[in-house]
Amino acid sequence: MIGLWIHRRIARTSLAKFGHHELDAFMKAWDEDGIFVYPGTTSMAGRFEGKEAVRAWFQRFMDRFPRIEFTVKHVGVEKAFGLTSNVTSVEWRVSVTNKRKEDYAWDGMTVIRVDKGKAVLVLDYIFDTSVLKRALGEDPERLERSA
């Protein structure tokens, strides 16, 4: 069960660092060849390979949202005793404020494959991407209303 405790703590700490825009500290947990996959059809969506590409994605997200606050709802692990190699799933809710000073929140889940203590594959799942589109200013209805 020590693996579960450790991975819960790491997940909560990592999301707090991300929320505080502590990018250097957040990226310490990533493998040099780490892969991040972000869902949907927004400008943020895609597959980002290598630590520098992943870092650039997170920097871009932080630049778009001056306030980012995660609430961790649930953390699960594949192996209760897996310390340095495991798969962790984190269910969360994120609340953000964009540069237009608009507040948004959406729910999602992140699945993290860790090998030798570093994130090698991270997959995000968002339950309602329409909220993300509005937060990013990419909602087609909003764009039509402002034209």
Image: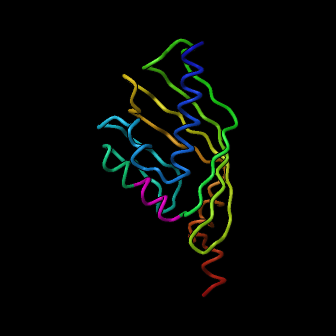
Percent position of residue 45, x then y: 47, 55
Closer to the camera, 44 or 69? 69
Using the rendered view, name the quadrant where residue 100 is placed: bottom right
> Residue at coordinates 56% horizontally, 72% vertically from top-left?
99
Quarter of the N terminus within the rendering: top right
Residue 71: image quadrant is top right
Numbered disc total: 0
Residue 108 x %, y %: 63, 44
Q: Is residue 92 magenta?
A: no
**Boundaries of the magenta span:** 57-64
Classify 83 as above or below 22: above
Residue at the bottom extreme of this rendering: 147
From this view, report whether residue 85 is shown above or below residue 41. Answer: above
Give the quarter of the figure containing the C terminus: bottom right
Residue at position x 66%, y 47% in the image: 127
Q: Which residue is pictured at 51% across the width and 45% down the height?
A: 17
Query: Looking at the image, which is closer to me, 121 or 29?
Result: 29
- Magenta span: chief secondary structure: helix
Q: Quadrant of residue 125?
A: top right
**Left or right: residue 35 compared with residue 127:** left
Q: What scheme was used to colour the molecule?
A: rainbow
Q: Is residue 61 magenta?
A: yes
Relative height, residue 144 to residue 130 (above, below): below
In the image shown, does 87 or 13 lie closer to the viewer? 13
